[in-house]
Amino acid sequence: MKILVNPDTKTWNKELARPVQKMKEIEKIVKPIMKKVKRQGDKALKKFALEYDHVEIDSLLVEEAERNASGAKLGVELKDAIQTARYNIEKFHKLQEMPAISSEIMQGVTCMRRSVPIQKVGLYIPGGTAPLFSTVLMLGIPAKLAGCEEIVLCTPPDPKGEIHPAILYTASLIGITKVVKAGGAQAIAAMCYGTASVPRVDKIFGPGNQYVTAAKQLATRQGVAIDMPAGPSEVLVYADDTAIPEFVAADLLSQAEHGVDSQVVLVCPTEKFVKKVLTAVEEQLRELPRQKIAKKALENSVAIVMEKMNSALDLINAYAPEHLILAVKEEERAVQGIVNAGSVFIGNYTPEAAGDYASGTNHTLPTNGYARSYSGVSLDSFVKKITYQKITAEGIQSLGPAIEVMAHHENLEAHKRAVTVRLNYLSNRKKDGF
């Protein structure tokens, strides 16, 4: 990792630049895939499974018997861990439920709002080198709590044409029954357009590689919503001498092993502590099975010495990390100073991996600086909020004149007339003695 000492603010964007994704070139590859799925449906999905996953698939949908048998393929320890995570994620997301609100804003004018579930949602679950059964929990639980009518899960099959048993077990555990053997951009296309096996959905969720990301963005042009713009995973660790170097190193590597295009950033007040952490990184890196991936990611990464906390917080907010770990003495000051981050992990004993798996918060978070304007996935992501209003005869007489004036000054006379005809009607009724 490159080390920078008190870099000038003018250089921050350049020094902290994420690995570049050539989205235009990727879209050129993805667009024909999506068009083929739109035209050929299931037939295209099976062709792509053969081409990209090297497997011939008879049925795209996972049979009930296969789902039911998945639990027997997992050890008790893993199933217990999944159950613990499920309990915590469910408990935290249930707290996010918002009751309907209603208020008489002025006499005779009542405004209301209530949450309504998105009817059809699609969940994309990566299943390649790291089958993310944890993401099934992170997306499936809030979808179920929200009351989404139809939930379809797409995940790529292995060379035997099977889905990883932990993904199937987790899906069954939370009540997801429609699991499709399809991965990559073609799976996103299937959920975007619909096929004989895959229903068209209203919103698509889930992480994926650059082709999945591009396909999701293209889906938005077809009227399908997505959870958020997403890119490679990232973490920023802000640590001082009260932090434990081995812990910090482990947290940096836990993100670096995600992919070669991941990025990790270390911010410390002293160069001495940075070097302690980097020594620990080198030692731990030798023991990692995904050493090559992590090593490549570290080439995209940087350690920054920022002596003053205010400057460090400014840099963190400018970077807007997906994951932010705070392991500093002035913990509360640091927490209060953060305005741009996907999820924050506080203290020496709060690894980012806790949020990835089982603490209860969601791990589907904005990357690439989108934490400046986007939130991570939550229960709110699976609902839409509809507002209502009811105005009585008394209410329109009180509010109507203000509406008429405003509409007139915007030169929208039909808007004004919609009020005027009602006021005239009420006025005439009053004259007639009603």
Image: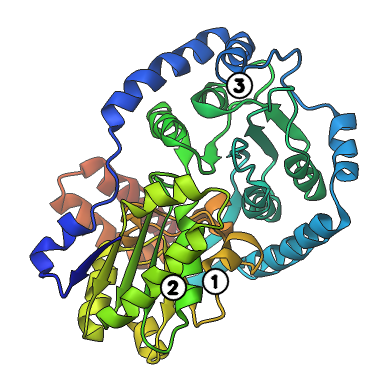
Horizontal and vertical percent for residue 358? 66, 65
Q: Quadrant of the N terminus?
A: bottom left
Q: Which mark is residue 325?
A: 2
What amino acid is labelled 3 in the image? Asp
Task: Answer above or below: position of 128 versus 166.
Answer: above
**Residue at left 86%, top 31%?**
66
Horizontal and vertical percent for residue 417? 28, 45
**Mark 1 Cα shell of 10 Å, populated few (<14), some (14-19), many (≥20):** some
Q: CA distance from mark 2 to mark 1?
A: 8 Å
Q: Nearer the viewer, residue 30 or 190?
A: 30
- Can you see residue 289? yes
Q: CA distance from mark 1 to mark 3?
A: 34 Å
**Residue at left 46%, top 39%?**
225
Give SS at disc 1. Answer: loop
Q: Quadrant of residue 42?
A: top right
User: Left or right: where does residue 49 sit relative to residue 275?
Assistant: right
Q: Which residue is mark 1?
A: 351
**Residue at left 52%, top 67%?**
352
Task: Answer above or below: position of 44 versus 359.
Answer: above
Horizontal and vertical percent for residue 163? 73, 32
Do the numbered discs 2 and 1 sit on residues whose CB atoms are within 8 Å?
yes
What amino acid is labelled 1 in the image? Pro
Total numbered badges shown on the rendered structure: 3
What amino acid is labelled 2 in the image? Ile
Q: Which residue is mark 3?
A: 53
**Residue at left 64%, top 32%?**
154
